[in-house]
Image (tube, rainbow, N blue to C red):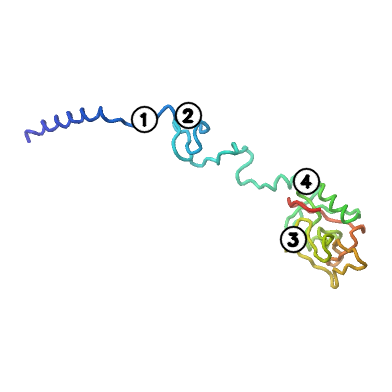
Amino acid sequence: MADAPYRGLVRAALLALVLPACTFPTRSGEFACNADSDCASDRFCDLGYCVVGAKPDAPPRGDGPLPIDAPIDADPFAQIAMQCMQAGYQQIAAANNGLYKTVGAGTSWTNAQADCKNDVANATHLIVLSNQGEVTYMATQLGWIGLSDQANENQFVTVTGETGDLRPFASGQPDNGGGGEDCVQMKSGGQLDDDQCGNSHRYVCECDGRISNP
């Protein structure tokens, strides 16, 4: 064991010869940063330098920071709903909590649809009976709904292009009686009837954020 101190001295001497020949990586000034925006898209700023990877919980880049009052999971319909309520629409629990406005003054189907559509751009239209709650509600209001076969006879389409809507036509309806009965109204008893589009009926507008045509 007398040679142990000698072996220690030899090892130290070898390390002294080898270490100067090694080049250890250091952080380069090329990657210095003050914020994530100073770095390439595949890096983020960490302790003054751009490092590879994505910053934990960081929002996607490209769209800028999110407004403080607009969380990622914010409901995009909330603002539209507020505009509709300012335009006189009310939330109706019986109709699955949708937003509607009843207009008691009679007018043609075309004017009714135009009036509804004008309330909130790309969001309002004559009511489309998308569920049983809306059928039940419309049976208490009566008048024009957003359904017609003006484009092609006996091919009824909704103003929003929705399919699968409910169409509780009365027995024998639609019948295009007398010709030109291309627009649909809700009559008493909760049943639909096709009628002359130029006739005057009350109507119900719906706000659901859907674009309508016409």
Disc 1/disc 3 C-alpha distance (Å)? 65 Å
Mark 1 vs mark 3: give the one in front: 1
Q: Earlier in the sequence, mark 4 or mark 1?
A: 1
Which residue is outermost to the left?
2
Whether the residues at callouts 2 and 1 have beta carbons within 8 Å, the answer is: no
Residue marked by disc 4: 121
Q: Which residue corresponds to mark 2?
A: 33
Label 3 secondary element: loop
Q: Position of residue 200 (x, y in %)?
A: 92, 57
- Element carrying mark 1: loop
Quadrant (top left/top right/bottom left/bottom right) for the N terminus:
top left
Identify which residue, 162 or 18, lies in the foreground. Answer: 18
Indicate the position of residue 28 as horizontal and vertical percent values. 40, 29
Task: Look at label 3 and name its amino acid.
Answer: Ser
Question: Is residue 13 placed above or below 184 in the rendered structure?
Answer: above
Label 2, residues with CA under 10 Å away: few <14, some 14-19, many ≥20: some
Q: Are marks 4 and 1 in contact (CB under 8 Å)?
A: no
* Dot 3 crowding, Cα within 10 Å, few <14, some 14–19, many 20+: some
Q: Residue at x 86, y 59 (%)?
A: 143
Q: Do labels 3 and 2 touch, CB within 8 Å?
A: no
Three-letter code, disc 2? Cys
**Mark 1 or mark 3: which comes first in sequence?**
1
Amino acid bearing label 1: Thr
| Sequence order check, earlier mark of 3 and 2 | 2
